[in-house]
Image (tube, rainbow, N blue to C red):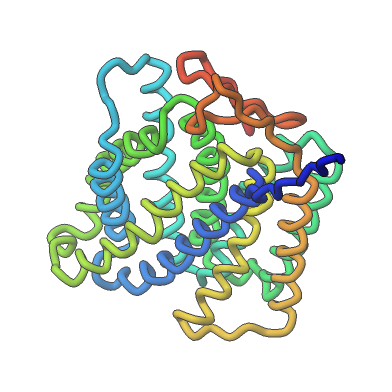
Protein backbone atom coordinates (compact mmCIF):
# COMPACT_ATOMS: atom_id res chain seq x y z
CA UNK A 1 0.00 0.00 0.00
CA UNK A 2 1.45 3.32 -1.04
CA UNK A 3 0.90 6.58 0.67
CA UNK A 4 0.11 9.42 -1.66
CA UNK A 5 2.02 12.55 -0.90
CA UNK A 6 -0.22 15.45 -0.16
CA UNK A 7 0.72 18.75 -1.71
CA UNK A 8 0.67 21.47 0.85
CA UNK A 9 -0.79 24.62 -0.67
CA UNK A 10 1.63 27.51 -0.60
CA UNK A 11 0.48 30.88 0.55
CA UNK A 12 1.05 33.30 -2.33
CA UNK A 13 3.54 36.02 -1.54
CA UNK A 14 3.25 39.55 -2.74
CA UNK A 15 6.06 40.17 -5.22
CA UNK A 16 8.45 43.04 -4.82
CA UNK A 17 7.08 44.69 -7.95
CA UNK A 18 3.48 44.53 -6.73
CA UNK A 19 4.40 45.82 -3.28
CA UNK A 20 6.65 48.53 -4.73
CA UNK A 21 3.95 49.64 -7.16
CA UNK A 22 1.39 49.83 -4.38
CA UNK A 23 3.74 51.93 -2.27
CA UNK A 24 4.39 54.35 -5.14
CA UNK A 25 0.69 54.72 -5.96
CA UNK A 26 -0.24 55.30 -2.33
CA UNK A 27 2.51 57.92 -2.02
CA UNK A 28 1.50 59.75 -5.21
CA UNK A 29 -2.17 59.68 -4.22
CA UNK A 30 -1.44 61.22 -0.81
CA UNK A 31 0.95 63.75 -2.32
CA UNK A 32 -1.53 65.10 -4.86
CA UNK A 33 -4.38 65.49 -2.40
CA UNK A 34 -1.94 67.18 -0.06
CA UNK A 35 -0.97 69.57 -2.88
CA UNK A 36 -4.63 70.38 -3.54
CA UNK A 37 -5.07 71.14 0.16
CA UNK A 38 -1.88 73.22 0.19
CA UNK A 39 -3.13 75.39 -2.69
CA UNK A 40 -5.97 76.56 -0.45
CA UNK A 41 -3.42 77.62 2.17
CA UNK A 42 -1.47 79.98 -0.11
CA UNK A 43 -3.63 83.05 0.70
CA UNK A 44 -2.88 82.47 4.39
CA UNK A 45 0.87 81.85 4.35
CA UNK A 46 2.18 82.15 0.78
CA UNK A 47 3.65 79.37 -1.37
CA UNK A 48 7.07 79.31 0.30
CA UNK A 49 5.52 79.61 3.75
CA UNK A 50 3.30 76.58 3.15
CA UNK A 51 6.25 74.61 1.74
CA UNK A 52 8.28 75.44 4.84
CA UNK A 53 5.42 74.48 7.15
CA UNK A 54 5.07 71.20 5.28
CA UNK A 55 8.76 70.38 5.65
CA UNK A 56 8.95 71.35 9.33
CA UNK A 57 5.90 69.26 10.26
CA UNK A 58 7.21 66.27 8.31
CA UNK A 59 10.68 66.62 9.84
CA UNK A 60 9.34 66.71 13.41
CA UNK A 61 7.05 63.75 12.78
CA UNK A 62 9.70 61.59 11.09
CA UNK A 63 12.30 62.41 13.73
CA UNK A 64 9.90 61.46 16.52
CA UNK A 65 8.95 58.18 14.84
CA UNK A 66 12.35 57.09 13.46
CA UNK A 67 14.70 58.51 16.13
CA UNK A 68 17.62 58.31 13.66
CA UNK A 69 21.15 57.73 14.92
CA UNK A 70 23.31 60.82 14.40
CA UNK A 71 26.69 59.73 15.77
CA UNK A 72 29.01 57.38 13.95
CA UNK A 73 28.00 58.43 10.44
CA UNK A 74 30.65 58.72 7.74
CA UNK A 75 31.34 61.80 5.66
CA UNK A 76 29.80 60.05 2.68
CA UNK A 77 26.63 59.42 4.70
CA UNK A 78 26.36 63.09 5.62
CA UNK A 79 27.05 64.12 2.02
CA UNK A 80 24.04 62.05 0.91
CA UNK A 81 21.90 63.48 3.73
CA UNK A 82 22.92 67.05 2.90
CA UNK A 83 22.25 66.68 -0.82
CA UNK A 84 18.99 64.86 -0.14
CA UNK A 85 17.82 67.54 2.31
CA UNK A 86 18.71 70.42 -0.01
CA UNK A 87 16.87 68.68 -2.85
CA UNK A 88 13.78 68.18 -0.69
CA UNK A 89 13.72 71.86 0.29
CA UNK A 90 14.21 73.17 -3.24
CA UNK A 91 11.78 70.66 -4.80
CA UNK A 92 8.97 71.57 -2.40
CA UNK A 93 9.44 75.32 -2.71
CA UNK A 94 9.70 75.34 -6.51
CA UNK A 95 6.63 73.12 -6.95
CA UNK A 96 4.52 75.25 -4.62
CA UNK A 97 5.69 78.38 -6.41
CA UNK A 98 4.55 76.69 -9.64
CA UNK A 99 1.03 75.77 -8.45
CA UNK A 100 0.67 79.29 -7.05
CA UNK A 101 0.93 80.54 -10.66
CA UNK A 102 -0.45 77.77 -12.91
CA UNK A 103 -3.14 75.05 -12.48
CA UNK A 104 -2.23 71.98 -10.45
CA UNK A 105 -2.72 69.59 -13.39
CA UNK A 106 -0.46 71.60 -15.70
CA UNK A 107 2.23 71.90 -13.01
CA UNK A 108 2.14 68.15 -12.39
CA UNK A 109 2.34 67.43 -16.13
CA UNK A 110 5.44 69.60 -16.47
CA UNK A 111 7.04 68.33 -13.28
CA UNK A 112 6.78 64.69 -14.33
CA UNK A 113 9.05 65.36 -17.33
CA UNK A 114 12.00 65.11 -14.93
CA UNK A 115 11.30 61.53 -13.80
CA UNK A 116 10.43 60.51 -17.37
CA UNK A 117 13.80 61.80 -18.57
CA UNK A 118 15.44 59.86 -15.75
CA UNK A 119 13.63 56.67 -16.77
CA UNK A 120 15.00 56.97 -20.31
CA UNK A 121 18.55 57.69 -19.09
CA UNK A 122 18.69 54.85 -16.56
CA UNK A 123 16.67 52.24 -18.48
CA UNK A 124 18.57 49.36 -20.07
CA UNK A 125 15.68 47.84 -22.02
CA UNK A 126 14.00 49.07 -25.19
CA UNK A 127 10.60 48.34 -23.64
CA UNK A 128 11.34 50.86 -20.89
CA UNK A 129 11.80 53.56 -23.52
CA UNK A 130 8.50 52.53 -25.11
CA UNK A 131 6.60 52.90 -21.85
CA UNK A 132 8.27 56.25 -21.17
CA UNK A 133 7.24 57.48 -24.64
CA UNK A 134 3.65 56.31 -24.10
CA UNK A 135 3.54 58.05 -20.73
CA UNK A 136 4.93 61.22 -22.30
CA UNK A 137 2.15 61.09 -24.90
CA UNK A 138 -0.46 60.91 -22.15
CA UNK A 139 1.15 63.77 -20.26
CA UNK A 140 1.26 65.88 -23.44
CA UNK A 141 -2.42 65.16 -24.06
CA UNK A 142 -3.27 66.33 -20.56
CA UNK A 143 -1.56 69.61 -21.42
CA UNK A 144 -3.14 69.94 -24.87
CA UNK A 145 -4.69 73.34 -24.06
CA UNK A 146 -1.24 74.75 -24.54
CA UNK A 147 1.52 75.32 -22.04
CA UNK A 148 2.45 78.45 -23.99
CA UNK A 149 -0.52 80.31 -22.49
CA UNK A 150 0.63 79.61 -18.95
CA UNK A 151 2.60 81.99 -16.75
CA UNK A 152 6.22 81.47 -17.92
CA UNK A 153 7.54 81.90 -14.38
CA UNK A 154 5.19 79.18 -13.17
CA UNK A 155 6.29 76.93 -16.04
CA UNK A 156 9.93 77.53 -15.10
CA UNK A 157 9.27 76.62 -11.48
CA UNK A 158 7.43 73.43 -12.55
CA UNK A 159 10.30 72.35 -14.82
CA UNK A 160 12.80 73.08 -12.05
CA UNK A 161 10.70 70.98 -9.68
CA UNK A 162 10.79 68.16 -12.25
CA UNK A 163 14.58 68.24 -12.46
CA UNK A 164 14.78 68.23 -8.67
CA UNK A 165 12.34 65.32 -8.53
CA UNK A 166 14.68 63.29 -10.73
CA UNK A 167 17.51 64.13 -8.31
CA UNK A 168 15.24 63.14 -5.43
CA UNK A 169 14.71 59.67 -6.93
CA UNK A 170 18.47 59.17 -7.25
CA UNK A 171 19.20 60.39 -3.72
CA UNK A 172 16.30 58.47 -2.15
CA UNK A 173 17.77 55.27 -3.61
CA UNK A 174 21.19 56.15 -2.20
CA UNK A 175 19.76 57.01 1.23
CA UNK A 176 17.78 53.78 1.24
CA UNK A 177 20.95 51.78 0.66
CA UNK A 178 22.98 53.59 3.35
CA UNK A 179 20.51 53.98 6.22
CA UNK A 180 18.16 51.49 7.90
CA UNK A 181 14.40 51.95 7.67
CA UNK A 182 13.57 55.64 7.07
CA UNK A 183 16.49 57.09 9.07
CA UNK A 184 18.10 58.70 6.02
CA UNK A 185 14.82 60.38 5.11
CA UNK A 186 14.32 61.66 8.67
CA UNK A 187 17.80 63.22 8.72
CA UNK A 188 17.38 64.70 5.24
CA UNK A 189 13.96 66.12 6.08
CA UNK A 190 15.46 67.87 9.11
CA UNK A 191 18.13 69.42 6.87
CA UNK A 192 15.48 70.48 4.35
CA UNK A 193 13.34 72.06 7.07
CA UNK A 194 16.28 74.08 8.41
CA UNK A 195 17.24 75.26 4.91
CA UNK A 196 13.69 76.30 4.01
CA UNK A 197 12.91 78.05 7.30
CA UNK A 198 14.49 81.46 6.44
CA UNK A 199 12.64 81.53 3.09
CA UNK A 200 9.34 80.63 4.71
CA UNK A 201 9.74 83.25 7.44
CA UNK A 202 10.46 85.95 4.87
CA UNK A 203 7.40 84.92 2.85
CA UNK A 204 4.91 84.38 5.68
CA UNK A 205 6.37 85.75 8.91
CA UNK A 206 4.11 85.37 11.94
CA UNK A 207 1.24 84.11 9.75
CA UNK A 208 2.80 80.66 10.11
CA UNK A 209 1.79 80.70 13.79
CA UNK A 210 -1.94 81.10 13.08
CA UNK A 211 -3.73 78.07 14.66
CA UNK A 212 -5.82 77.30 11.55
CA UNK A 213 -2.75 77.60 9.32
CA UNK A 214 -0.78 75.35 11.65
CA UNK A 215 -3.53 72.73 11.67
CA UNK A 216 -3.95 72.66 7.90
CA UNK A 217 -0.18 72.80 7.49
CA UNK A 218 0.18 69.73 9.68
CA UNK A 219 -2.26 67.87 7.42
CA UNK A 220 -0.30 68.99 4.35
CA UNK A 221 2.98 67.92 5.96
CA UNK A 222 1.66 64.44 6.63
CA UNK A 223 -0.10 63.96 3.27
CA UNK A 224 2.51 65.62 1.06
CA UNK A 225 5.81 64.78 2.75
CA UNK A 226 6.01 62.41 5.71
CA UNK A 227 3.73 59.70 4.31
CA UNK A 228 4.58 59.74 0.57
CA UNK A 229 8.35 60.15 0.98
CA UNK A 230 8.48 57.23 3.41
CA UNK A 231 6.43 55.06 1.05
CA UNK A 232 8.60 56.04 -1.92
CA UNK A 233 11.83 55.28 -0.07
CA UNK A 234 10.48 51.81 0.76
CA UNK A 235 9.35 51.36 -2.85
CA UNK A 236 12.84 52.12 -4.17
CA UNK A 237 14.05 49.09 -2.21
CA UNK A 238 11.74 46.89 -4.30
CA UNK A 239 11.70 48.37 -7.82
CA UNK A 240 14.27 50.04 -10.04
CA UNK A 241 14.47 53.84 -10.28
CA UNK A 242 13.55 53.55 -13.99
CA UNK A 243 10.30 51.75 -13.12
CA UNK A 244 9.63 54.23 -10.33
CA UNK A 245 10.10 57.11 -12.76
CA UNK A 246 7.53 55.73 -15.23
CA UNK A 247 5.08 55.12 -12.38
CA UNK A 248 5.59 58.77 -11.45
CA UNK A 249 3.95 59.68 -14.77
CA UNK A 250 0.67 58.81 -13.03
CA UNK A 251 1.09 62.09 -11.14
CA UNK A 252 -0.78 64.28 -13.69
CA UNK A 253 -3.63 61.77 -13.76
CA UNK A 254 -3.85 61.82 -9.98
CA UNK A 255 -3.56 65.62 -10.05
CA UNK A 256 -6.51 65.76 -12.45
CA UNK A 257 -8.47 63.46 -10.14
CA UNK A 258 -7.56 65.57 -7.12
CA UNK A 259 -8.55 68.71 -8.99
CA UNK A 260 -11.89 67.11 -9.88
CA UNK A 261 -12.64 65.92 -6.33
CA UNK A 262 -11.15 68.75 -4.26
CA UNK A 263 -11.08 71.83 -6.51
CA UNK A 264 -14.17 71.02 -8.66
CA UNK A 265 -12.16 71.03 -11.91
CA UNK A 266 -13.92 69.18 -14.77
CA UNK A 267 -12.44 66.30 -16.81
CA UNK A 268 -13.05 66.21 -20.58
CA UNK A 269 -13.14 62.93 -22.59
CA UNK A 270 -9.61 63.60 -23.88
CA UNK A 271 -8.45 63.96 -20.29
CA UNK A 272 -9.76 60.47 -19.57
CA UNK A 273 -7.98 59.17 -22.71
CA UNK A 274 -4.73 60.74 -21.54
CA UNK A 275 -5.15 59.19 -18.11
CA UNK A 276 -5.73 55.79 -19.75
CA UNK A 277 -2.48 56.15 -21.75
CA UNK A 278 -0.49 56.96 -18.63
CA UNK A 279 -2.02 54.06 -16.71
CA UNK A 280 -1.21 51.70 -19.61
CA UNK A 281 2.40 52.90 -19.63
CA UNK A 282 2.72 52.47 -15.88
CA UNK A 283 1.22 48.98 -16.02
CA UNK A 284 3.52 47.95 -18.86
CA UNK A 285 6.57 49.33 -17.07
CA UNK A 286 5.81 47.26 -13.98
CA UNK A 287 5.03 44.04 -15.89
CA UNK A 288 8.22 44.18 -17.98
CA UNK A 289 10.56 45.57 -15.31
CA UNK A 290 13.65 43.52 -14.30
CA UNK A 291 13.09 41.35 -11.27
CA UNK A 292 14.91 41.88 -7.99
CA UNK A 293 17.04 39.09 -6.58
CA UNK A 294 15.50 37.35 -3.53
CA UNK A 295 16.85 38.24 -0.12
CA UNK A 296 19.16 35.71 1.51
CA UNK A 297 19.88 35.05 5.16
CA UNK A 298 22.77 37.46 5.15
CA UNK A 299 20.62 40.06 3.45
CA UNK A 300 18.19 41.59 5.95
CA UNK A 301 14.79 42.73 4.79
CA UNK A 302 15.61 46.31 5.62
CA UNK A 303 18.45 46.39 3.10
CA UNK A 304 18.09 47.15 -0.56
CA UNK A 305 17.83 44.15 -2.93
CA UNK A 306 20.21 43.75 -5.82
CA UNK A 307 18.44 44.47 -9.10
CA UNK A 308 19.28 42.55 -12.26
CA UNK A 309 19.42 44.31 -15.62
CA UNK A 310 19.02 47.63 -13.88
CA UNK A 311 20.86 50.02 -11.60
CA UNK A 312 22.48 48.06 -8.77
CA UNK A 313 21.89 49.04 -5.16
CA UNK A 314 24.30 47.37 -2.77
CA UNK A 315 23.02 45.63 0.34
CA UNK A 316 25.71 46.53 2.83
CA UNK A 317 25.21 49.92 4.47
CA UNK A 318 28.88 49.91 5.35
CA UNK A 319 30.04 49.70 1.74
CA UNK A 320 30.07 52.66 -0.57
CA UNK A 321 26.90 52.30 -2.62
CA UNK A 322 26.65 53.00 -6.30
CA UNK A 323 22.92 52.61 -6.85
CA UNK A 324 22.44 54.32 -10.17
CA UNK A 325 24.31 56.43 -12.62
CA UNK A 326 23.96 60.18 -12.38
CA UNK A 327 21.03 61.66 -14.32
CA UNK A 328 23.28 64.26 -15.86
Q: Position of residue 234 (x, y in %)?
A: 50, 42
Q: Residue at x 25, y 57 (%)?
A: 203
In which quadrant of the rendered view does residue 100 lie? Answer: bottom left
Can residue 44 be seen here? The reply is: yes
In which quadrant of the rendered view does residue 64 lie? Answer: top left
Q: Residue at x 68, y 70 (%)?
A: 142
Q: Residue at x 49, y 42 (%)?
A: 233
Q: Depth check: 138 or 301 in front? A: 301
Q: Is residue 84 above or below residue 154?
A: above
180 sits left or right of 23 in the view: left
Q: Is residue 45 above or below residue 324?
A: below
Q: Position of residue 82 (x, y in %)?
A: 37, 29
Q: Is residue 293 above or below residue 130?
A: above
Quadrant holding the N terminus: top right
Q: Position of residue 283 (x, y in %)?
A: 74, 58
Q: Position of residue 147 (x, y in %)?
A: 64, 67
Q: Is residue 174 above or below residue 253?
A: above
**Tag count:** 0
159 sits left or right of 290 in the view: left
Amino acid sequence: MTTASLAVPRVPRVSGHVAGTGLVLAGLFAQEFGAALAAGLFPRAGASGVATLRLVVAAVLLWAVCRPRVRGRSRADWAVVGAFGATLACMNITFYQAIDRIPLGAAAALEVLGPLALSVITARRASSWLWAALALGGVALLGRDGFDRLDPVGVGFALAAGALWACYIVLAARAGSRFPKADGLALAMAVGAVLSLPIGLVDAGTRLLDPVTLGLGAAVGILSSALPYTLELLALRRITPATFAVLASLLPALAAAAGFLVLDQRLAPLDLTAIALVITAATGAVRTAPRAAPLTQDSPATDTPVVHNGPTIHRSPESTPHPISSPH
